[in-house]
Image (cartoon, rainbow, N blue to C red):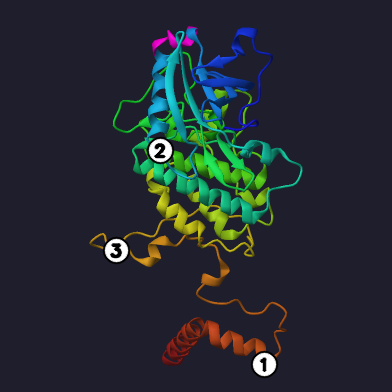
Amino acid sequence: MSDAANASTGTPPADWLPERIGSCRILQILGMGGMGVIYKAVQEPLNRVVALKVLPPQFSQDRDSSLRFETEAKAVSMLQHQNIVQLYEYGEENGSRYFTMQYIDGESLAARIDQKKPIELERIVDYAKQICRGLRYAHSMGVIHRDIKPGNVLIDKNEVVRLTDFGIAKLITQHSITVTGVTVGTPEYMSPEQAEGQDLTAASDIYSLGILIYEMLTRVPPFLGSNPIAVAYKQVHETAPPPSLGRPDCPKRLELVVLKCLKKDPRERYQQVDELLRDLDTVDIAERVERPTVSMKRTPKPRGGTPVDDERRITDRRNSERRRFDRIPERLPVNSPEYWVHVLHYQWPLLLAVAVLALLLIAHLTGRA
């Protein structure tokens, strides 16, 4: 965690800033949220700076809150990856559950997006790839994050990106967590199936990552509303406008990647993060969108189910380069030889048909005479 990972929502009570918890000496409070308080602390005797997350006693006694907190600890403890915040220790003291995590000296992606200067395209693609690598590893370990958003992505001083806050993560080997009165997930980043309360797969995290990349490009998520229900409705029923409308220099292939992530039907998205990562590797920063992209279609697999290279194509069928016939140049005068050369070259089937009909008509009229 970092100082910018969670903005403090007010001055905490004095008893929320103890001198010590477990083996940690508290330095300062970093943030407060629905799942407890996060401190910056020194873990002794290792003298290691850590982020200490504590679930207060009143929540520790609540079964649902305790289950979510324990699930986060279990989820993070399974994950040892460069692009995921590492868990060090899990314990309980004086009725409060806590765990220590890797402290990230940097800022959140949310803070980076809020800066006046837009994020460079090269960095956007690099950040997306790093998040993909962290997610790919988490999914391989049976963990679905379920709350991918800018506030849960940390960037250190060396531009290394790390996922954090697995508070509502789903362990695939366990049942989903349901908490009465608590919104599970963030509406602006929820997949349609998550908004409808359905069972989630890796495709749900991929949808949320698509929204995150969209926001890195345009500085706002595609779906906003006056309340969470309105936002959730849009996630289910509305189509995201192409990111190039808000970011004209958006590379064409990156736009296609984002819009494929945001398909409403999970079966039409990338099914595995590996697929998404491979397409991100092919993004050309210099390529521009000539016109807004409306839709994409998946290339079907050949019979027998054997993947082919063409399956990785992200199709935009409105590209003029794929038309069967070129148009006749509009500026050529009708009485110029070049004009009729183009007509004969591209419209000869039509001219031939007209000539045949003319001969048949002449023969018919001659016969009657």
Q: The N terminus lies in which quarter of the figure?
A: top right
User: Which residue position is annotated with label 3?
Assistant: 302
- Report the front residue among 69 and 339: 69
Label 1 to label 2, Cα distance in Å? 72 Å
Estimate how packed mark 3 is, as few (under 14), some (14 to 19) or many (20 or more) residues with alpha carbons within 10 Å.
few
Q: Position of residue 329 (x, y in %)?
A: 66, 79
Magenta region's main secondary structure? helix
Q: In the rendered image, is residue 368 in sight?
A: yes
Describe the element under mark 1 as helix, strand or loop: helix
The residue most toward the front is 45
In-image side of 123 versus 280 (left or right): right
Q: Position of residue 191 (x, y in %)?
A: 47, 36
Which amino acid lies under the numbered mark 1 shown in the image of this protein?
A: Pro
Which amino acid lies under the numbered mark 2 shown in the image of this protein?
A: Leu
User: Which residue position is annotated with label 1?
Assistant: 337
In the image, residue 72 above or below residue 85: above
- Report the front residue among 167 and 256: 167
In the image, residue 228 above or below residue 209: above
User: Which residue position is annotated with label 2?
Assistant: 79
Asked if labels 2 and 1 touch by Cβ distance under 8 angstroms, the answer is no
Q: In the rendered image, is residue 197 in sight?
A: no
Describe the element under mark 2 as helix, strand or loop: loop
Q: Position of residue 87 (x, y in %)?
A: 45, 32
Q: Earlier in the sequence, mark 1 or mark 2?
A: 2
The residue at 75%/46% (across/down) is: 117
- Report the front residue among 333 and 359: 333
Which amino acid lies under the numbered mark 3 shown in the image of this protein?
A: Pro
